[in-house]
Image (tube, rainbow, N blue to C red):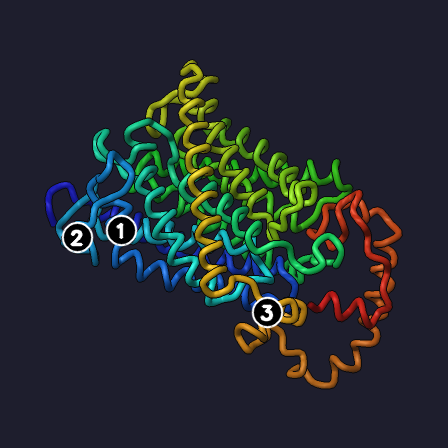
Amino acid sequence: MPDGFSAGDTAFVLISAALVMLMTPGLAFFYGGMVRAKSTLNMLAMSFLSLGIVSVLWVLYGYSLSFGSDSFAGLIGNLDHLGMRGLGLDELTGSIPVTAFALFQLMFAVITPALISGAVADRARFAAWGLFIALWVTVVYFPVAHWVFFFDGGHGGWLGDRNGVIDFAGGTAVHINAGVAGLALCLVLGKRIGFKKDPMRPHSLPLVMLGSGLLWFGWFGFNAGSALAANGVAAMAMVNTQVATGAALVGWLVYERFRHGAFTTLGAASGAVAGLVAITPACGSVSPIGAVAIGLVAGAVCCAAVSLKYRWGFDDSLDVVGVHAVGGAVGSLLVGLFATGGVGQGVKGLFYGGGIGQLGKQAMGVAVVAAYSFVLSWLLAKAVDRLVGFRVSGEVETAGIDQAEHAESAYDFTAVGAGLARALPGLAAAAATSAAERSAGRSTERTGERTGVAEPGAAKPAVQPAEKRTEVDAR
């Protein structure tokens, strides 16, 4: 190997790439548990489809557009690396092979469109979703990745390298990008049938918790691996990831308890993800105390933000906007306050004597990525809808998208035998009693479909007969 090669750094980045890859199945479980049972497989498949499509496009031209030598004043990479051409075994970036770096960045490209899928749960045609992924990563993700992640001594991407916007691991390029794209998609596709009327609570909170745990685990590779070396910056990024996530979990639960009257497991899982999102742009630039502050703020703010869809009338099914767009913006902006100058890029934020300049740069990065992503995502979604039809029919949506799109069901109740059939009447009666108690009690003050109850001020469904309610809940 050439001079400068580090086996330890290379192993660290390769392991980090594997951890980031694990985040996409983790996201699939997280989203899969949050939807109703009739949409579980479709939600899982939407994330897995991204693994296939983006991996192929990355080799063909995605890496070249994202990390090829600069073209058009930092707007996009050139085509020198089409088909990964020119990435020899002995070529290094820093102390690792370029191929290891390309693999690591591929995993970022894979999970970003998968994040968007939660905004259109229950109602997107699978083939149309695949077409949208291919178009979106080409027109939106690859250019933004070049703006933010490509560094070439001041001649690279125009946001990160030329203008000094700090995004250590993808708060803008991944989370704001995906969150705002999710908003555009849910506006194009429209609301689900029964939005704010029918119960749409998660069908499997254990699956949600499992997915959240896998995301948390994989995120250590996402953030620490972005140091591209097994060094002190990577260690600090990992510490900050852990403490910010814990703080956000607490912040979400505390806000939820005071606002809605309960500590929920869904809130704990969502708070953890909000913290992971918020610390992503900041993990290499702040101290652990700053990371705690960012996590607490992000947990409370994101918990409040998930209710905006009821006030503003957009159906962001799984809170992609409230968690990823808002969380990414919170973390990106707070870099301008909490950057210490002692780690990472050496830039100080306002609270450490650096003035307001970096905060202004961070705000510019947030605004530019959000505007670009929203406009292009809306146009692409409209084009896909016009070409092939993006939304399933009302009949398919009501009956269940799993059977219509995949000819499968996540839960085959006929396979468990007569024992379940004998138990169902008792289960239905217990469900009726529980639902009646919830309808009459404090649960009516909790947050919307996250717990199956309409947002305060919205119409609340009457208690239904047991057999009808069981049918609705199963959907």
Residue 117, position in %: x, y? 51, 56
- Is the residue marked by circle 1 packed among few (<14), some (14-19), or many (20+) residues within 10 Å? many
On screen, 187 above or below 51? above
Instruction: Report the amino acid beneath label 1.
Output: Tyr
Residue on which the image places disc 2: 87
Which residue extends farthest front?
386
Q: Nearer the viewer, residue 401 or 217?
A: 401
Q: Which mark is residue 214?
A: none
Q: Earlier in the sequence, mark 2 or mark 1?
A: 1
User: Left or right of 311: which side holds 272?
Assistant: left
As drawn, is 420 to the left or to the right of 173?
right
**The quadrant where residue 171 appears:** top left
| Element assignment for label 1 | helix
Mark 2 vs mark 1, foreground winner is 1
Q: Look at mark 1 in the image and give the residue it sits on.
A: 63
Q: Are marks 3 and 1 in contact (CB under 8 Å)?
A: no
Quick one: quadrant of the C terminus? bottom right
Check contact, mark 2 vs mark 1: CB within 8 A: yes
Label 3: few (<14), some (14–19) or many (≥20) C-alpha neighbours in 10 Å: many
Question: Residue under circle 3?
Answer: 401
Q: Is residue 139 left or right of residue 429?
A: left
Whole-percent x, y for residue 357 in the image:
40, 18
Crowdedness of circle 2 by 10 Å Cα count: few (<14), some, many (20+)?
some
From this view, report whether residue 126 is shown above or below residue 75: below
The answer to whether any part of residue 445 appears in the image is yes
